[in-house]
Amino acid sequence: MDAHGKPPSEKQFEILIRMHCDAGRGLRVYYVYDKMRNKFGVKPRVFLYNRIMDALAKTGHLDLALSVYSDFKEDGLVEESVTFMVLIKGLCKAGKIDEMLEVLGRMREKLCKPDVFAYTALVRIMVPEGNLDGCLRVWEEMKRDRVEPDVMAYGTIIGGLAKVGRVLEGYELFKEMKSKGHLIDRAIYGTLVESFVAANKVGLAFDLLKDLVSSGYRADLGIYNNLIEGLCNLNKVEKAYKLFQVTIQEGLEPDFLSVKPILSAYAEAKRMEEFFKLLEKMGKLGFSVIDDLSKFFSHLVEKKGPVMALEVFTHLKEKSYVSVEIYNILMDSLRLSGDVEKALSLVDEIKGSDLKPDSSTFNIAILCLVDRGEIKGACECHNKIIEMSCIPSVAAYCCLAKGLCEIGEIDEAMMLVRDCLGNVTNGPMEFKYCLTIIHICKANDAEKVIDVLNEMMQQGCPLGSVVCSAIISGMCKYGTIEEARNVFSNLRERKLLTESDTIVYDEFLIDHMKKKTADLVISGLKFFGLESKLKSKGCKLLPD
């Protein structure tokens, strides 16, 4: 257009800017603005300046927004209320409260004070950012301007204070709100009840429940669930159970969160008779008891560890409240606590029952068997997963590959590396570098392999047995023993490998090269049809 003597107009630039603003492309907005003002000499109107600054502030480019504001002032334009509010909101979002208050002061002097909607918008920006101190400073400015906060402003700041553990400050604002006769939303009650329970102030939480009911509201299930949990935390499980019955009477359809704290309290107190009665009650109410027990055991092992969970599970087995998922949860917890033997005994227990192990069972078994040094058994579990048309977990792939490398089964380990990267969407960085190393070995140059290893370690990926095995695999297939030894010598000199590890990898290197040489010899014999003649003379081609 410019080359044809028709330079673009402000309106045309505005269309481009508006399109980029709507798409949230802040840097593109600035690029168009820069061309508009500095190349074509077109100065935006106040309206367009506001839009540009707003787009930059919303996309996190506050520094550019402030530079545009400098241009705004340089062009001799006068701020509107929208101009000030765009800057104030951007500064609030960035947590620059002092600068925001300075702009707010200029807005008061030159134009007007913000109204309740503007102040509420500022509160709503800062609460999600977690800047409650800045939010309270804005609250003080609101009082200074004698602007009466609305229900939205109160609800936002009370909820924000409650969620970050400053519930008493939120409660004071709640009382202030109530004294002014505002209609308080039930969600505000729910947030305060939840925070009071979390702070172990259950008495205040019940006071809020009474206040809620006296205000004409009906408590929702979330409020009751929080109160049940608070009572159980205070070892008042009987009162908690009564409250649970109230939820049934109110027709609120209690869920797992309603019974979880009661079940936990019964389990910790070893009151199994009441525990089973509650399970029966759950069944009558339409709960999926076995699924909920799986969630319960996940909670129990996280809170109390596997020992108590196993005690409870022993009682559950007598009543046939069992599932493979519960077994898996217990097995994984035992493995993480170091009791591999007990975890594997649970695998045998599943096999001896009417339950069928799933892929998760075998994944956990792989981790346990590798820890115990039973690599062959771990490989059998891997094959079981494949037979089920499932994919092993990334943890199982990594653990089994490492186990195979440690016993010198390098080809099998590299096969697992390829399988993992082919089957999962985001494989381990270590595995990706293994394939890179094998490919680089085609150059038969130790320096190039070392460069890849340095890059890998700079990316935070440690040097492990799988990576070292990849060096052996690549050099035996494409390079020489000498270049492989040069790589390991370099790593030992840099103290990235111990001397004992270097000796072990050297033995693996020699053994693996022998295997590769033997494979080539056998392939040649098969090609020329000499294998049968050697066998007839009693020659062995492969070890048993």
Image: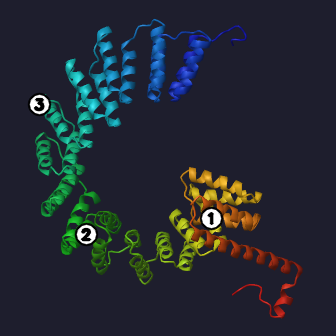
Element type at mark 1: helix
Q: Amino acid at mark 2?
A: Leu
- Residue 424 location (% of width, % of height): 57, 59
Dot 2 alpha-carbon crowd within 10 angstroms: few under 14, some 14 to 19, many 20 or more: some
Q: Amino acid at mark 3?
A: Ser
**Point 26% across, 64% down: residue:** 285
- Residue 416 location (% of width, % of height): 61, 67
Residue toward you, 229 or 331: 331
Mark positioned earlier in the residue sequence (1 or 2) = 2
Q: Is residue 184 left or right of residue 395?
A: left
| Callout in the foreground (2, 3) | 3
**Point 34% across, 69% down: residue:** 290
Q: Is residue 528 left or right of residue 22?
A: right
3 and 1 marks in contact (CB < 8 Å): no
Residue 179, numbered circle: 3
Extreme residue in the top direction: 76
Mark positioned earlier in the residue sequence (3 or 1) = 3
2 and 3 marks in contact (CB < 8 Å): no
Residue bearing mark 2: 279
